[in-house]
Amino acid sequence: MIESYTFGRIRIDGVTYTTDLIVFADHIKPNWRRIEGHKLHVEDIVDILRVKPEILVVGTGYYGFMKIPPETKKRLQIEGIRLIEEKTGEAYKIYNELSRSKRVVGAFHLTC
């Protein structure tokens, strides 16, 4: 469970992370890098596509600067994965709620 988030820091199960990360049901992938820092391309979510969650919750940053291009949204739709995108401060709360009953993955940009 994600316990808290502030600019550049997220606390999950007692561990504080300071890099962007992906939260899977059974593990966390820290140091998540994207092709372009503030755009989420299909190539950036290959690991997520492999596990085929019902829902992908994307935290777009403290100010919401990370954008999701139409081609990425289209690919998620083709794969049958529902996309929820919100600023990270709201996205982590949505992730926590949904993860109680759904197969959900969270991808979180921690800074801007």
Image (tube, rainbow, N blue to C red):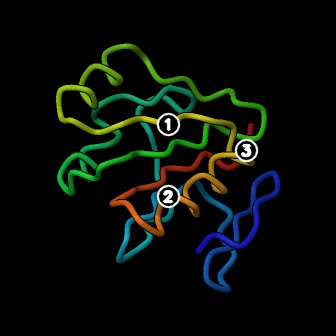
Residue in view at x 45 percent, y 58 percent: 22
Q: Is residue 42 left or right of residue 111?
A: left
The Cα–Cα distance between marks 3 and 1, rounded to whole angstroms, is: 18 Å
Residue 14 in percent (x, y) is at: 67, 86
Q: Identify the mark at residue 98; answer none if there is no mark.
A: 2
Residue in view at x 69 percent, y 75 percent: 16
Q: Is residue 41 left or right of residue 77?
A: right
Residue in view at x 21 percent, y 51 percent: 52
Residue type, numbered disc 3: Thr
Q: Is residue 96 above or below residue 1?
A: above
Disc 1 vs disc 2: Cβ atoms closer than 8 Å? yes
Residue 112's quadrant in the figure?
top right
Mark before the other along the chain sequence, 2 or 3: 2
Q: Is residue 95 above or below residue 89?
A: below
Residue 107 in percent (x, y) is at: 49, 50
**Where is mark 1, residue-wise?**
84
